[in-house]
Image (cartoon, grey):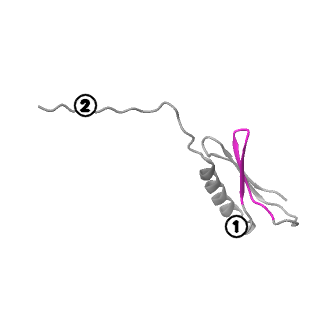
Amino acid sequence: MFSVVITSSCSLVKSDICDQQTALDIGTRLMHDKFPRSINDSNPIKIYERNGLWRIKGTLPPGYAGGVPNVILNRKTCALLKVYHTQ
């Protein structure tokens, strides 16, 4: 006779589902969709976290004047809060 015991465990600690790379991917896609002419692959898109929000923004080459696209996402859920372009 055989006995089989199956056990499992689950963690009560929830990991962040909206990590920096996920937020950057979402923000970059939103920028390309909303402002396709404002994105230049040679200029990096920067991301930083502040006050529970991911802030993703385009950049300009040194010495250039103008605006850049910006995306703000919820830090925990990656929910879109705002997408806009500065001047």
Q: Secondary structure at mark 2?
A: loop
Question: Picture coordinates of residue 28 (x, y %)?
Answer: 66, 59
Question: Picture coordinates of residue 36 (x, y %)?
Answer: 70, 67
Q: Secondary structure at mark 1?
A: helix
Quarter of the figure with the C terminus: bottom right
Please determine whether, in this image, residue 87 is positioned above or below residue 78. Answer: below
Mark closest to the chain's N terminus, 1 or 2: 2
Residue sitting at x 28%, y 33% = 6
Question: Picture coordinates of residue 79 (x, y %)?
Answer: 62, 45
Residue sitting at x 59%, y 45% = 18
The residue indicated by pointer 1 is 36
The residue indicated by pointer 2 is 5
Circle 1 residues within 10 Å: few <14, some 14–19, many ≥20: few
Q: Is residue 37 magenta?
A: no
Most common SS among magenta residues: strand
Residue sitting at x 18%, y 31% = 3
Q: Amino acid at mark 2?
A: Val
Question: Picture coordinates of residue 75 (x, y %)?
Answer: 65, 42
Circle 2 residues within 10 Å: few <14, some 14–19, many ≥20: few
Please determine whether, in this image, residue 7 is positioned above or below residue 81. Answer: above
Magenta region, residue range? 45-60
Q: Quadrant of residue 34?
A: bottom right
Horizontal arrangement in the rendering, residue 62 relative to residue 15 (left or right):
right
Quarter of the figure with the N terminus: top left
Q: Amino acid at mark 1?
A: Pro
